[in-house]
Image (spheres, helix red, strand yellow):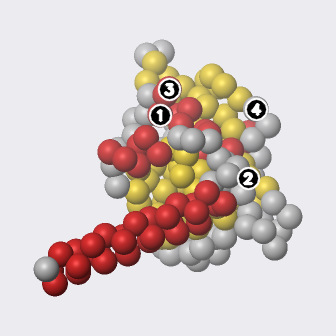
Amino acid sequence: MKSTGIFFAGMLLMLSACEQSSSNQSSASAADSSNDSLFMVTEGPFAFSILLPKDLMISDSTLLRFMPSTGEMVIQIGEGFRLLVREESASLQQLLEESASSGVFTNQPVEQDDQVVIYQQFLPTGEAWYYQVAGVVRHESKAYSVRSDPMGEFTLFEARQMAEAIRGISAPDA
């Protein structure tokens, strides 16, 4: 009888904890879509929030790691989503030129707006390769350049998911 009472008390505690966490999440995710999760990044020189695709996070683990050796923040979900964030003020054109400077690929923009460009890489033979994404995020006192991992081999769908995440980066409220 005593163990039954403990069991029910434990169940009540779990239910109240679930209700409390869901009410906390509802205020944080009110501005995002139902398929995104809000993450706060506060490592190294970085202080921003980012909306990450929940459907990927269900099947793969999420890695948020500051790399002091390169000054980059790595945001990775599985193999098909890997963004590198730098604290720098750059234009989309500069990011495209930098990615083309390897000499191996030429880049052709596929989709572009004022914040993000998705481009396809082509081999010197003209053979189409994979997609990459680059973006710029500017807030009052911070500027970030964001790009997909240049070693990654991403599909157009994956590049679009990363582009949406870049658009979902915002500075914390002051």
| Dot 1 amino acid type | Glu
Answer whether labels 4 and 1 touch (C-beta < 8 Å).
Answer: no
Q: Which residue is mark 4?
A: 113
User: How far separated are the C-alphas under marks 3 and 4?
Assistant: 16 Å
Residue at position x 54%, y 52% in the image: 37
Rendered-image quadrant of the C terminus:
bottom right
Q: Which residue is mark 2?
A: 137
The total of numbered circles placed on residues is 4
Rendered-image quadrant of the N terminus:
bottom left
Answer whether labels 1 and 3 touch (C-beta < 8 Å).
Answer: yes
3 or 2: tag closer to the N-terminus: 2
* Residue 97 can be seen in this image: no
User: How far separated are the C-alphas under marks 1 and 2?
Assistant: 20 Å
Q: Secondary structure at mark 2?
A: strand
Q: Secondary structure at mark 4?
A: loop
Q: Secondary structure at mark 3?
A: helix
Kindly give the residue lying farthest to the front in the view shown: 1
Answer whether labels 1 and 2 touch (C-beta < 8 Å).
Answer: no
Residue at position x 50%, y 75% in the image: 68
User: How far separated are the C-alphas under marks 3 and 2?
Assistant: 21 Å
